[in-house]
Amino acid sequence: MDITKKIQNAQKDLPVDLIGSIIIVCATSCFVLVVTWGGVTYAWNSSIIISLIIVCAVLFGAFVVQELRHPEPVIRFELYKIRNYTFSTIVMFLFGMAMFGGFTFVPFYFEDVLGNSAIIAGLKIFPLVAGVMTCSTITGIIISKTGKFIVFPVLGLSVFSTGLGLCMLMSKKTNYGLDALFLFLVGSGMGFSFPVYNSIVQNSVPPQHMASCISTLVFIRQMGACIGISVLGTVYQRFIKHYVKEYGVTHMSEVYSRSLHKVMEGALIFALIGWLFAFGIRNEKQLFNRVSQKSVNGNIQDSAPAPNDTEGDVEVAAGLAHAI
C-alpha cells in the first residue's frame, strides 16, 4: 500500500480535537493579556486582571480535562513520563521566552540609544544571524556524523547566557566591534541548541506520536516566545517610566539604554533557569541510533521497518496525519 494512501486513510479515521484547540487558544490569549496589561494598563488587583486570571485558570483546567478524555489530544500528557521529552519542552519554553524576548528588543538599542535608522539597525544585528547560521550548521554536521548530542543543550544555553550577560554592557561608550561580538555569542548559543531539541524529542517518543510531539514542542516554544515578549515588554515600559523620573526627558538615550539592560537581565534569568533544566536531559541509548548505525555501517538497518510491518506503517502514518 502506498504511504500517501495510508496517510489519507489515517486522516479519515483520526478524530480532531477541535474543542481542545479552541480552549488552549483562549487560555493562552487570556494569559498573554494578563502579563501584558498587569501593572501597566491595569493594576494587578483590578477587577479586569483578576477576572482574566480566573478565566485563564478555568480554561487551562478545562483543557487538561479535555486532553485526558480525547483519543487524539493536542498535547499528550502521558508522554511527559519520558524524561527527555519533559525536560526538552521545559527548556524550549524558557528558551523561547529568553530568545524571542531578548532578540525583539535588540534593534531598539541601535535605534533609540545610538540613533541609527531601522535599516542600519537591521544590518548591525547581522552578527547574531551569522552566529545562528554558523553554529547550527556545525551542530548538525557533528550530530549527523557522530550521533552525539548531549553536550549541545548545555553548551548552547551557556554560550547564549554569556552573550546576554555581555549585552548588558552595551552602551554609547562601547564600539560596534564589541557589540558585534556580543551579538555573535548570542546567535552562537541559539545555533548550538536550537536544532537539537527537535531531534531529541523525535528520538525519545514512540514513532506513532513523533509528529504530534514535534508540533507540541513548536507550540510550547511559540507560547514561551509570546509570554517572553509580553513580560519583557512590560519590564521595558515600567523601567522607561522609572528612569525618565530619574534622568529626565533630556537624557532619553540613557533612559532607553538602562531600560534595555533590565530587559536583557530578565531574558538572562529565563535563560539560566533553562540552562539548569538542560542538565536533566540524558544521553539514552535509543537516541540517534539510526544516525549512529548509518555512520558505522553505511546504511540504516535496525531502524528500518520490516517489509511486512503494515501495522507500524499505519501508526506512523497516523502520527503524520495528526500533525497535518
Image: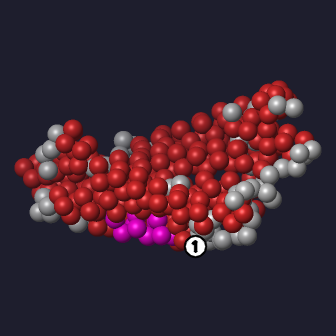
Residue 172 occupies which quadrant of the picture? bottom left
- Residue 12, placed above or below residue 26: above
Q: How many residues crowd mark 1 within 10 Å: few (<14), some (14–19), many (20+)?
A: some
Residue 70 occupies which quadrant of the picture? top right
Give the colour scheme shown: secondary structure
Q: Could you tell me which residue is drawn at 20 percent across and 56 percent down?
A: 257
Q: Could you tell me which residue is drawn at 29 percent across and 54 percent down?
A: 127
Amino acid at pointer 1:
Phe
Between 247 and 124, the residue placed more toward the observer is: 124
Between 320 and 241, the residue placed more toward the observer is: 320
Q: Quadrant of the C terminus?
A: top right
Q: Disc 1 marks which residue?
A: 279
* Residue 244 visible, this orientation: no
Q: Could you tell me which residue is drawn at 16 percent across and 51 percent down?
A: 113
Q: Which residues are magenta?
A: 154-164
Residue 38: image location, x then y, percent:
42, 47
Q: Could you tell me which residue is drawn at 59 percent across and 44 percent down?
A: 219
Is residue 156 located in the magenta-colored stretch of the structure? yes
On the rendered structure, is 157 left or right of 208? Answer: left
* Residue 254 visible, this orientation: yes
Q: Which residue reaches farthest front? A: 298
- Residue 70, placed above or below residue 126: above
On the rendered structure, is 75 left or right of 35? Answer: right
Residue 65: image location, x then y, percent:
76, 45
- Residue 50, placed above or below residue 17: below
Q: What is the secondary structure assignment of the residue under circle 1?
A: loop
Q: Quadrant of the N terminus?
A: top right
On the rendered structure, is 81 left or right of 43? Answer: right
Residue 41: image location, x then y, percent:
36, 41
Residue 81: image location, x then y, percent:
76, 62
